[in-house]
Amino acid sequence: MAYDNLLIDRHEGTATVTINRPKVLNALNTETLDELRHAVLDLQQDEGVRVVIVTGAGEKAFVAGADINELAVQTPTGGRDHALTGQHVFDLIENMGKPVIAAINGYALGGGCELAMACTLRFAADSAKLGQPEVALGLIPGYAGTQRLSRLVGKGKAMELILTGASIAADEALRIGLVNRVVPAAGLMAEARKLAAQLAAQAPIAMRYIINAVNKGVEMPFAEACQYEATLFGLVASTDDMKEGTAAFLEKRKAAFKGR
Ligand code: CO8
């Protein structure tokens, strides 16, 4: 599929998805969300892609939120449908089964912060600003921001950020656990690609189960989640990659994982 609002670049095992609406700071309109849904499903099926990086075009913004032009004219039922659609697309990203690295190259506000939170890992440029400013528009987060932010940084900090609508700098985002790493802006993509290459060499099925065990497990009672982990552990023991990984260790060589 040809995309009007996304750029997709595949290099070795890494696909980079760039939200490409720099004139409006990469704001997510309906069309872009739909393209993102297609792209995620496509990359999920592509066995050549082991890791995905999501970033924004230009130097100013990752994504400055949902497109406020659309929000300004939404109806109650349309708003609900719009929120559910966005939540669905972000769920697909979170549960894609491949690591998705958000390379946050500037403003990640509202829907942009929610997109970053749906990714598996977050690297931020030192110039990035993150927040959920919806309250200033008379709105609330609608792409699961109230839920993912409280799970990532705790209820108290999430309440403060969402109620005040304040944007925070990358260093503060790192301190509260909203991002994994802060790097100089000029080196952001290089750092994201470095980690992506490292992850692309890991066993894909093991990574899929890790993502699944963490995502599903945090929503379950502890004992049930441990049972779930044990089941996935048993399943991963049936893979060729498990045989290869353990044999490579014992033979003192580098493992070559095939995703089988
Ligand atoms: N939507 C549409 N256009 C935008 C958006 C946006 N979210 N953000 C920026 N733009 C546009 C501006 O209107 C401007 O356009 P123009 O050049 O035509 O005037 C252009 O991008 C450049 O922006 P600025 O001139 O404002 O750039 P500044 O450097 O002065 O400011 C800011 C940068 C601080 C990022 C500022 O643009 C801003 O505050 N943007 C809005 C941020 C925001 O409030 N985001 C949250 C939106 S609400 C949301 O995301 C809800 C998600 C859940 C939806 C659930 C479904 C119902």
Image: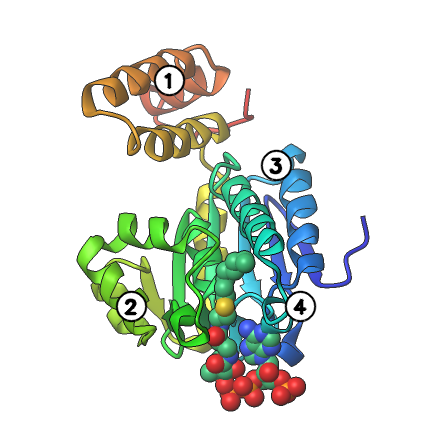
Task: Answer with left or right where residue 139 lies relative to residue 178.
Answer: right
The residues tagged by marks 3 and 1 sit, at their Cα atoms, a distance apart of 19 Å
**x and y, in percent, of residue 31 in the image:** 71, 58
Q: Is the CB atom of the residue marked by disc 3 within 8 angstroms of ligand 1's nearest atom?
A: no
Q: Amino acid at mark 4?
A: Asn
Q: Nearer the viewer, residue 76 or 95?
A: 76
SS of the residue under disc 2: helix
Q: Residue at x 39, y 57 (%)?
A: 122
SS of the residue under disc 3: helix
Looking at marks 2 and 3 on the same chain, the residue that comes earlier in the sequence is marked by: 3
Looking at marks 2 and 1 on the same chain, the residue that comes earlier in the sequence is marked by: 2
Q: Is the CB atom of the residue marked by disc 1 within 8 angstroms of ligand 1's nearest atom?
A: no
Disc sitting over residue 232 in the figure: 1
Disc sitting over residue 48 in the figure: none
SS of the residue under disc 1: helix
Q: Amino acid at mark 1?
A: Leu
Quarter of the view holding residue 28: bottom right
User: Which residue corresponds to mark 4?
Assistant: 20
User: Which residue corresponds to mark 3?
Assistant: 44
